[in-house]
Image (cartoon, rainbow, N blue to C red):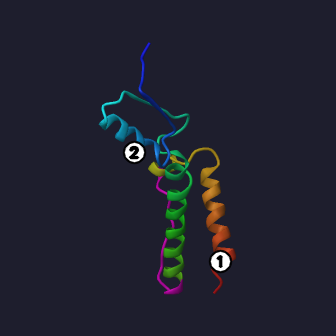
Amino acid sequence: MATYDAIVIGTGQAGPSLARRLAAARMQVAIIERGRFGGTCVNTGCVPTKTLVASVKMVDALTRAGKPYDLVVLPEQTHRLEGGSLEYVREAVRRYFTEHLKP
């Protein structure tokens, strides 16, 4: 059975950097992650939300400037949206337009 000097639970914001520092100090480190590496913020929270908001702001700017645009989800990207995520993104964009972007 393997033995470790430290076990880092979760790969969210602090997990990977903590594991790296411990390993640099010559400690035997194990990381336990029940979901996706990077945690909620990177995979489904902060980063995707900021990307969505930036995209919606760009569409709004194009609309206000009278510039033509097309909103496209490429087929190779749709597999990354699990379960109801694609529908969630569509609903979030619709809600943002109707609630925040008044002409």
Report x, y in % for residue 33. 51, 35
The reply to whether the magenta stretch includes residue 40 is no
- Is residue 72 one of those drawn in magenta? yes
* Residue pointed to by mark 1: 100
Task: Identify the residue under disc 2.
Answer: 17
Picture layout, residue 53 above or below residue 84:
below
Residue 21, image quadrant: top left
Indicate which label's residue lies in the foreground, 1 or 2. Answer: 2
Residue 13 vs 27, above or below: the answer is below
Q: Earlier in the sequence, mark 1 or mark 2?
A: 2
Q: Position of residue 24 (x, y in %)?
A: 30, 37
- Give the SS element for disc 2: helix
Specify the quadrant that holds the N terminus: top left
Magenta stretch bounds: 64-75
The residue under the point 56% across, 51% down is 44
Residue 19: percent from left, percent from top = 40, 38
Q: Residues within 10 Å of mark 2 (few under 14, many from 20)?
A: few
Q: Amino acid at mark 1?
A: His
Q: Can you give x and y, in whole percent of width and height, for residue 98 in the image?
A: 68, 75
Q: Quadrant of the C terminus?
A: bottom right
Viewer-proximal residue among 101 and 39: 39
Residue under the image location 54 percent in, 78 percent down: 60
Judging from the image, what secondary structure is the residue with disc 1 in? helix
Compare residues 8 and 99 and report the one nearer the observer.
8
The residue lying toward the viewer, choosing from 7 and 66, is: 7
Hey, what amino acid is under mark 2? Ser
